[in-house]
Amino acid sequence: MIISPDRKDFSTIFNILGRLSVVLSFFMLIPVVVAFLKNEFSPFFDFLIGFSASAILGFVLLIVFPIKKEVGWIHAFFTVSASWILFSLLGAIPLWLSSHFVSFLDAWFEAMSGFATTGLTLIQDLDHLSFAHNTWRHLTMFIGGQGIILASLSVLVRSRSVALGFYVGEARQEKILPNVVGTAQFIWKVSFVYLILGVVTYFTILFRQGQGVEKSLYHAFWLFFASFDTGGFAPQAQNIAYYHSLNLELATIIFMILGAINFNLHFWVWNKSKKEIFKNFEIKTFLFTLFSLVLILYFSFRGLGSSLSAFRGGFYQLVSAHSGCGFTNLSQTQLLSFPGLGLLAVIFAMMIGGGVCSTTGGIKLMRLGIIFRTFSMEIKRWMMPVKAVYRDRFHHLQDLTLSDKRIKEAYVFFAFFMFTYILGALVGMAYGYPARLALFESVSATANVGLSTGITQSSMPTVLKLVYIFQMWAGRLEFIAIFVSLGLLLSLFKK
Amino acid sequence: MKTNKSTIIFSISLLFCLSVFLPFVYSQSTSLKDLMVDPELFDQKEVRVSGEAIGEILQSDGGFWVNLLSSGYNLGIFSQNKSDFEDISHWGSYAETGDQIEVQGRFYKNCFQHQTTDIHMESLNVAKPGHKNSRVVSSRKVKTARLALIICFLVALMYFLKEKIWNKSSKN
């Protein structure tokens, strides 16, 4: 029997959305303060309008829609799906008012890209953007990466089982602590420690390069949000190439990988066993896929005249793509000049992504590892006696059996992602873009990476912008919350 | 004999002209777009580009960098001496429009020294000085913000009053 929501359910959902909208309005006060400190008057008013709009909507929803039912899993799934749309629409208001976007749709695209930690951008003249707007662009990645719902979870929800609904809806399958709220708080604690480490590292590098103290500090914060939350926005149009710094590239590689690691693994390494990092299934899969792709990259660049510079750019793109970050030290023309095999390696890296329960998108290492294992398990089965019962095992925090449930789940998500990658590529191809570029862009949007071959620009077709917005949204939430919400909405028509 | 002499003088003059002006065939002000779209054509050749100086001077890789912006295309300009950039007084940012500079130097599609695409600068001159941006806030925006803040305050007040009344009635 399928549960069908009624008016009371929707009242409850709108009430929670109202609360979240008020929470978002408070986040918008951060760029208001930045604009005030930097004497940026126009942005100051842009964010006052954004703050007021979010708060008004939030309070109106709270007044009009009281909680009429105890909050349950249906509400959690609906809220998670709708909150990303709501947040991106509200978050787009100050961006649109900045006059750096051709249309509101472009600003919405940018905001969704930020909240989904993708990093694809449609902004015009980024080099002349205000500090306040840049703060907001990077803050959206931090809010989205850490989990909008997760951020509000500790404050808003009292029931543990419902909190789990929000948690799962936000595409985080693994709990770190038995209590979900405890898990959320641990993730924020870890992030805060890395925030200090990251900001100090980036600040030191940028300050030594000759940026002033204040500017270095702002850039350090922004780059940390973009790297650890695997977002990929940067404050300058050249992205990481602006800084011309090998040290910065190495530092961003470290923080991109830290952001792509399962938070559960962070917990184990911090609190239980440091040896886990050498035994962990996801880390082993990551090393295997990364070195395989590096090898492909090496062979694709072999024979080219200036292989050193090509390889520096290639390796950085590969790590950036694999971690789902999207930072780049190349121009789009340079990326386009990659040999076919090299570009394919980057596409594969984007498809895979990082660990489950991290800020990355994509199929994820755990699922890919399980799929690899099922191949070897099947081969072993064929080599055994007919009546032999065989189950493969793997180590992820503890020794686990490769159960049918795990295999099925891995294949279902694999299929969802592959279908969406191909669907987006087909739409791109329908608009006349070459197949490999359309696939590259589609994968980049769905896996929340943000690398671009140049398709993503304000002059691209409106339908394609909408398709990429959907892909970023669906990829970030890993489909389930969205499909459940759509299914429940459809059930209304069957009543 | 006289003819030979004039031929030699003509040939020497021609050679001199060619040797002086030939390197500037590519340096007849190439656009950044052309460089970035078709880098093979200009690789390791003398070029002259112009654009807005962005950000600040950055020290890295045994020298100094300035980033150039023109028609949506960016490129890093490298020089070993910081003093080469001292003529630039305005840098492109939110607050300022940077100086329009003309740079002459050698373009590298894949610079072996820096593993990037860049220009190793030989000379620079400021073609058009930049300026501080006087950004006027539209009165419509200010009015909208004021009105939105007032509505926000009223709606928040309504909500808290409603909550208070609700709590009182539920206690009774």
Image: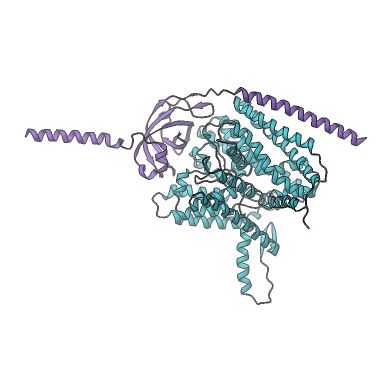
Chain colours: A cyan, B purple
Image point (63%, 27%), residue name: A44
Image coordinates of residue A400 in percent, x first then y, are: 70, 61
Q: Which of A378 and B155 is in front in this view?
A: B155
Image point (69%, 72%), residue name: A389
Quarter containing the N terminus of chain B: top left
Rendered image quadrant of residue A104: top right
Quarter containing the C terminus of chain B: top right
User: Left or right: A83 with respect to A252?
Assistant: right
Image coordinates of residue A315 in percent, x first then y, are: 50, 50
Q: Nearer the viewer, residue A206 or A262?
A: A262
Image coordinates of residue A39 in percent, x first then y, are: 60, 24
Q: Residue furthest left?
A: B1
Residue A189 visible in rendering: no
Rendered image quadrant of residue A383: bottom right
Q: Which residue lies furthest to the right in this view?
A: B172
Query: In the figure, A426 relative to B114: above or below?
Result: below
